[in-house]
Image (cartoon, rainbow, N blue to C red):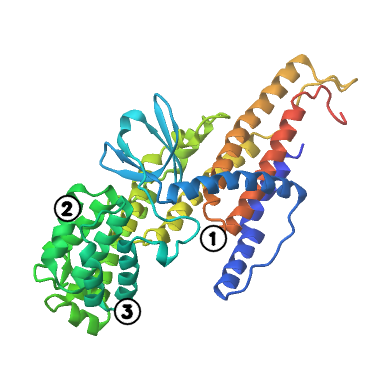
Amino acid sequence: MSLHFGLAMFLDERHGPVRARRDRHARQERAGVSPDSEFTSPSATRYSNRLRAFAAVMAGLTAVASSALADTIILKNGGFLEGKIVSDTTREVHVATRFGKRIFQKNEIEKSLPGPETEESSTEPSFADLPLALRALRNASAEYRLKQYESALARLEPFKDSQQSPTGRRRIEWMLVDLYERLGRWDDARTILEAKKQQGSPPEKIRAETHLSLFEANPDYAFRKLGDNPVRNFITDQSLLDAAKEPHALKDLRIMDVALKQICENMLRDGEFSIRKFSDSLKVDTTLEAIKKLKPGAHIEKLLPYMSELQKAELSLVKANAILEGYGDAYALDLARTELEHLMTVAQKMMQQAVEVGLDDFRVPFDARTGAITPEGRTQWQKRCDDVAQRLEPALLLLDYMQERIDYYPDAMRQFRKTLEGMYNRADHDLKSVKKSRSQTHVRNP
């Protein structure tokens, strides 16, 4: 019986050759060299093909969830997320988000807002085909990048109250906020920000509240502190530090950018729902016991004991992106790795337990003359096979979930994928062997 040999060998080797390859590949990637190509076994290829088909479906969901058409689901606990509702039953709502599928009870949801309209399509419209206001916005954006703020404002301000689609109006309003801030027209900026705080979408409210709180903490629009933290603790460039202390320093895009980045950093690293807090909440034995209850067809997301903490950390990423576009994306991979490394430990422990139950050392009562297993021995043998299978089946379902998570980061987690494929192939092979052996009626070579 190969169960003990297969799993135990893999678990032992993972910290040797696999780790060496991982370290070598990391060095190669840092040097800009493509990682070594490796032979893939036929079983791994079949597994990869199946997962690629699944990944294509997940990629489609991800594209929908991250598009401008994504719905906003507002939760009763004050949180929100952006995604696409893919299933809505009498009791549950399933949402495809940029982080994966999330399941909520109906009574957890305050309301859902349909995604905004968008003028964007797969083909970028020509400048001549744009409405006048969006032509002005495109030109003003170019002038903003060139720091021609007066010219950009003069071009865009006439369209401040023009009738646009909701998306077009939002883009114009936020460009006006940026321009008013660069020109030190704080009252004009505050007017739009206050309106956004009251009537904007959840991400807009987060962004507006951040700017307004920054103004409140620095009444002369200098940048001397963030909460109780003096800026000298995180601005290391002396010339920039001196400039930040001057009245109206927040006019300077560099200083405003530093302020917003530090707000995001504080939230993502040390905030109430930070990745560190999520990491601290993870308990291997607690997750292990929950996964053992997993049955085929069940939603693993409903069993994972840390899911509420994970969703809080994901909300921090969404808030960071609302404050500074794209800033939370750099931490999304860190969050995924934190979860996957935790689950890898859980999966290894489950597979090790299957090895420890094992079949190799089990002595089955049998007839010495014929080699036939006795009725009592057959009952014992089948029970032992079932014990091993009950440990391997939820482990395979867990590995499937981990693969779904990896599919959101195909390039960054290539080596993790290879390790996972190896674990899956070993466990799948041994489960099939166990099920086949369960019907065994004779002892081989008695």
Question: Quick check: 46 above or below 291?
Answer: below
Q: Amino acid at mark 1?
A: Ala
Query: Does the residue at mark 3 contact the one at mark 1 (Cβ under 8 Å)?
Result: no
Label 2 Cα crowd, 10 Å radius (few <14 / some 14-19 / many 20+): few
Where is 296 relative to 242, above or below? above
Residue 236 at x, y percent in the picture: 27, 79
* Apparent side of residue 278 relative to residue 233 in the rendered image (left or right): right
Q: Residue furthest right?
A: 369
Left or right: 304 as drawn, with respect to 350: left
Q: Look at the image and tell me in which quarter the N terminus lies.
A: top right
Tag 3: amino acid: Leu
* Residue situated in front as seen by the camera: 327 or 41: 327
Left or right of 214: which side holds 234? right
First-in-chain label (3 vs 1):
3
Label disc, if present, on residue 195 of the rendered structure: 2
Query: Which residue is identified by label 3?
Result: 146
User: Which residue has dot 1 on it?
Assistant: 412
Q: Nearer the viewer, residue 367 or 230?
A: 230
Find the residue positioned furthest to the left: 219
SS type, badge 1? loop
User: In the picture provided, is 275 more to the left or to the right than 378?
Assistant: left
Q: Position of residue 441 (x, y in %)?
A: 81, 21
Residue type, mark 2 in image: Ala
Circles 2 and 1, Cβ within 8 Å, touching? The answer is no
Q: Is there CB contact under 8 Å for labels 3 and 2?
A: no
Name the residue at 18% across, 57% down. Answer: 193
